[in-house]
Amino acid sequence: MALTPSSMLPLGTKAPNFNLFNTINQQYLSLNQVKKDAGLLVMFICNHCPYVKHILEGLITLGHDYLDKEIGIVAICSNDAITHPDDSPEKMQQLANKKQFPFPYLHDESQQVARAYHAECTPDFFLFDHNLSCVYRGQFDGARPGNSTPITGQDLRAAMDALLSNTSISSEQKPSIGCNIKWKN
């Protein structure tokens, strides 16, 4: 496992478009189908990464807490499923169903979406406003495997709450840290 920080996409960057396979319902979903009036949260996660596993219940809780809010939420797995079979669409569907994900879990087989978002690690978070401009790209919170920091999602939640209340989001944002995306050769 290579410890990799997020690339910190420049604030103001427009959300790249996508149309990806939703492993939960076996249909394709586009950016326009998942965004809501206030914006969109794009999370790059995967099944096997210990950093994602560590906060997974927190991500699911966040998804439920914001389900009725005006921020769309989508999770994307871009890992090479050949070298990492735990991240195959079938395994993604199994995990999403077992854990009852409250958000779509999309498969980025070509890895073009991860590249367009400059995603580097799992987990990697990108929050966009109503104009689909990036307003937050950073960590969920300070919790990591091996530390005793509680899993609260406080950093991401603060940004999402500020977006919903139309207040400013601090540009001082800490990068997410996790496993590198498993790129195809």
Image (spheres, rainbow, N blue to C red):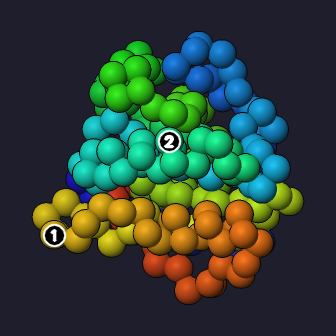
Residue 41 visible to the viewer: yes
Foreground tag (2 vs 1): 2
Q: Residue 96's image quarter?
A: top left
The quarter holding residue 81 reads top left
Q: Tell me: 93 left or right of 119.
A: left
Q: Residues within 10 Å of mark 2 (few under 14, many from 20)?
A: some
Question: Does residue 185 show up?
Answer: no
Q: Residue 149: give x, y in percent of width and height.
A: 23, 71
Q: Which mark is residue 64?
A: 2
- The residue lying at 76 percent from left, 62 percent from top is 129
Asked if 85 appears above or below 44 in the picture, the reply is above
Report how far apart the C-alphas of labels 2 and 1 lie in the structure: 24 Å
Amino acid on which disc 1 is placed: Ser
92 or 102: nearer the viewer: 102
The residue shown at (51%, 48%) is 65
Judging depth in this view, the residue of 136 and 164 nearest the camera is 164
> Relative to 9, does residue 83 appear above or below in the rendering?
above
- Rate crowding at label 1 as few (under 14), some (14 to 19) or many (20 or more) other CA atoms within 10 Å: few
Q: Which residue in the protein does label 1 denote? A: 148
Looking at the image, residue 140 sits to the left or right of residue 163; the answer is left
Task: Give the mark nearest the N terminus, 2 or 1.
Answer: 2
Tell me: residue 49, above or below residue 15: above
| Image quarter in which the C terminus is found | top left
